[in-house]
Each structure stands twice: as C-alpha cells, then as structure tokens.
Amino acid sequence: AASCQAAGPSYTTTGDVNLLVTVLFGYFWVLRFGPTDSVQRLAAASLTVTVGLLVAGVLFPSSVWIGGRLLGGVFGGSASPAVLCIVLGLSGTGFRRSSVRRLAILAGGFLLALSQVRAGYVAVAAYLVIAAVIGSRHLASRRVLLALIAATPFVVVTEAWRGLAAYLIRDTASLATLSDRIPLWAAVVGVMMRESPWLGLGFYAIRPWTLAYNEGIGSGHSSYVEVLAGGGILSVVAFVIVLALIAGGLRRAARPGAAADSQSYAQAALGILIACMVLAVTSDEAVTGGAASFGLFMLPGLTSALLANPGGRPNVGS
C-alpha cells in the first residue's frame, strides 16, 4: 500500500490524461461523423464485444468466467456492452436491420444473465420505464415492458420467481452491503473527508486505501466514489452538474415537438445515459475505460449535435 501511495501522483496524471483523451475522442468523433453514425458505431462495437465475450466463454472459459459468472475477466467488464446492446437494440436506432437488432437484444440479454450483474438488470429496467414515460417512438421497448408486466402474474402464481430470483440476485445476504461495497465506500470517503474534502485524494489514486480495507480490492467499485474520493466535493458536484445538463439537453431534444429522427436519436442517447449512470453506481468502468466510459463521454458531443439541429434529420458530420 505504501508503494501505491507514493505512486499516487502518477496514477492521477495517467488517469486524467486518459479521461481527457476519451472525452475529446468522443466529442470529435461525433463532430466528424454525426449522431447517426456515432450511435450506430457504438451499437456495432457493443455487439462485437458482447458476441466476442460469449464466444470466449466457450473457447477460453478460464479467462472470462469468474466464480461461475461470465464477467469478462482479462477482456474487460461484460455488463456494460451487454446493457448497451439491449438499450440500443430496443431504441430502434442503433442497428439498421431488424434481424441484427434482435440478435443484439438476445445476445445482450444472454450475456447479462450469465454475468449476473444486478446493476445491469436495474439499468435495463430503468431504461424501459423512462422510455415508456417519455413516449418512445419505437415499439420494441414498450412491447418488452408490457411482456414483462404480463408475465409477472404467471411467474408469481407458479412460484417460478423463486428460482429466477435465486439465480439473478445470487446472494440475497449481500444486497444489504452491495457485496461489501458500502463499507468500502464509507472507509475511502471517510479518509477523503479527513484529509482533503474539497480536492480529494487524487484521481485514480485511492488504491492505497482500498488495499488497506481489503487487499483483494483494487478500486472503489463505483464511478461516483472514484470521482468523490479522487477529486473531492468540488469534482463530484461538477460531475453531477454535467450529467444533469446532458440529461436536460437530451430531454429537450427528445421533446414531442422535435423532428422524428432527432427525437429517436435523442431518446437513444438518453438510454445510453441512463444505462451508464446506473452501472456507474457499482462499477468504476464509466470513468476508467470500457464501453460505459466511451458511451458516457460521447454524450456531450451527441447532445450538442442534436440540439444544434432540432428541426430535421441528425447531421451526418462535417
């Protein structure tokens, strides 16, 4: 832990540079190719990773299966690409062909079930509910939500929910502490509040304290905790404000009076935001790399492009 603490500044520098590159890459990607192409390429990348992880689960099981769950292992997290596949498939904008859209939804759902990541279930459920509330133009999300509601009485009456809940929730005893994450967050944030409440301990430099809590843990296991403990109160307030501005911008772009194409892509981008924000609660992937990170930091460019052209088809780039 002492050696990690000494290397804290280098962790911070490297992490900040990676974060800046990700944000700029996402912004200029949207500026160059436009919202339509950007969303579709993100969907294609998510589907490629999802299928790749499923194949790796068969061919290289020791590399991707951890404790009986297909979590991705050395290839990165599995929940983020799976959730993005489902969200972009249901949104109707991520994939041009309906057959590919169905494949994405099925592959994403299958990988998410094998990963047993509870935050992933919540992310998909949150997207379905909000898509229904804002009046999604695409029927796929509504149909899935209605099918789940219709199946609920059958599952309850037949008591099939017991086996389903046992598989999906895994260990109910771990729910109270979110698999020991809450005590970890309390310990790390407690150190931050004592030593540097406003500026934090340094981005991506909290590893010494996570190791002190549990030698088998390397991160804060939450993007929000990484930002709060690493950058302090000022950073987490700025982070929340940015997320709120993106959400407000996408909500305006998705308003009923907007053009059909712009509205559809704004709703898809809103789905990406919802998924990433939920996954960020129990994973640091949204700020440290991976599908959730690129999806999240592509949103400022998407929001700007959609708001800049509210009356017509989303621009195709410059």
Image (cartoon, rainbow, N blue to C red):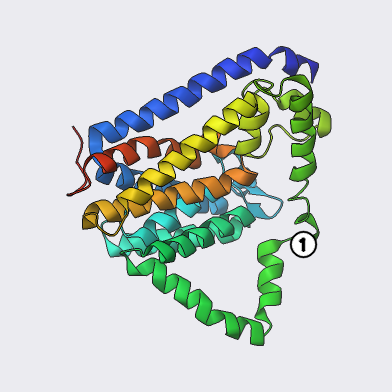
Give me the residue at 41% from left, 48% from top: 48
Relative to 195, is 152 above or below?
below
Q: Quadrant of residue 100?
A: bottom left
Give me the residue at 73% from left, 51% from top: 178
Q: Position of residue 144 (x, y in %)?
A: 44, 71
Give me the residue at 48% from left, 64% from top: 129
Image quarter in which the C terminus is found: top left
Relative to 113, is 15 above or below?
above
Horizontal arrangement in the rendering, residue 262 relative to residue 56 (left or right): left
Q: Position of residue 199 (x, y in %)?
A: 64, 20
Horizontal arrangement in the rendering, residue 259 relative to residue 104 (left or right): left
Q: Residues within 10 Å of mark 1 (few under 14, many from 20)?
A: few
Judged from the image, the secondary structure of the residue bearing numbered disc 1 is helix
Give me the residue at 34% from left, 61% from top: 101
Horizontal arrangement in the rendering, residue 277 relative to residue 197 (left or right): left
Q: Quadrant of residue 236?
A: top right
Give the amino acid type for the residue marked by disc 1 in the picture. Answer: Thr
Name the residue that disc number 1 marks: 172
